[in-house]
Image (tube, rainbow, N blue to C red):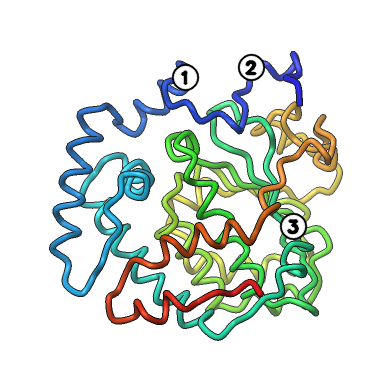
Amino acid sequence: MEMDNSRSEFLRYDTTDTNDPVTVKNMQEINETEETRARCLEILRRDLKRVKDLEPCLDEIFLSPFMRVSKYDTAKAFQRVIKYYQQLDVYLDIYKKFSFPLQEAESIRHLKLSPYRCADNSFLLFGKAAIDYRKYTFAHRFYLELVTSHNFIQNPVNQICGGTFVFDYEGMDIHGYLAFTPSWTRVFVDSLLNTYPCRVKAMHVVNMPSFFPLILKVLNQFLPKKIKNRVFFHAKKNDWKDLHASISPEILPEKFGGKLKEDELVNIMHDLKAEEEKFLSFFAYGNIKTKKDRLSMKVFQ
């Protein structure tokens, strides 16, 4: 797809060059320099090697997003990695006997990206909340998000600049409401905010159903104040002025009053089998006591 001149001010999503002058401000925000990166990596590796009963991945490609989301605070980076490995055992308990036909998984496609980044260079992810919950459970949806998000965060520009999320609740019915149990909500929020190594710049909730306040009541139990201040609600359908005040319509799809055609959006769920293989390669590391079970886990069938 050729660059639209009207969008030339926006960084492309597929940018991977961390030396791009446009991202200098983002790197300054997270205190990244060659010196801090090398120093933090050395400390993080040293501290992880000392953890009993843990086989950590010490590759820089794995540790970099944890350092960046923590703004090179080594103590915070270490705690997030530990939380990540603890969360892997939670996922193991959920999915070790769980199967999901690949063809069905590929048909859901509820996550897409704008081909352009926001003004602050964060990637712009659109999530459709209303999948068919009569056919699928929250566990199905969450595994798709685990596999997909785990892999697109490997883009170093995504790590540095973070993400802006638009959650669309259009079509959400009572089946979807019942799927958002407190236990699943806790796992989802804990993974997004405390485990997943990504800077959350903003979250926008659109097309809220009438019962959304009930979902919000559950969510609010688990959201820290800092994140609550980054969550924005857009209740009026087909009136996107408040959304456009935060995100330019130039990089939004037409359904949100934007100028992008649906087929211009980036489908990040196009090769789930390969994505799962990459996810499971990292899943091999962690608690030594559960390694055998982790190595045998494979959800897509």
Question: Which residue is the site of mark 1?
Answer: 20
The answer to whether one can see residue 7 in this image is yes
How many callouts does the rendering have?
3
What label does residue 9 carry, if any? Answer: 2
Q: Quadrant of the N terminus?
A: top right
Between the residue at mark 2 and the residue at mark 1, the CA separation in whole angstroms equals 14 Å
Left/right placement of residue 1 relative to residue 25 reads right
Q: Quadrant of residue 36?
A: top left
Q: Amino acid at mark 3?
A: Arg
- Residue found at x 20% / y 59%: 48
Rendered location of residue 6, percent (x, y) = 75, 16
| SS label for mark 1 | loop
Is residue 106 depicted above or below 114 in this figure? below
- Residue linked to disc 3: 109
Instruction: Say whether disc 1 or disc 3 marks the residue closer to the N-terminus.
Output: 1
Compared with residue 201, is residue 277 higher up or lower down, i.e. above or below?
A: below
Q: Which residue appears at 41% of the width and 70% of the height?
A: 88
Label 2: which secondary element: loop
- Horizontal arrangement in the rendering, residue 300 relative to residue 238 (left or right): left
Residue at the top extreme, as displayed: 5
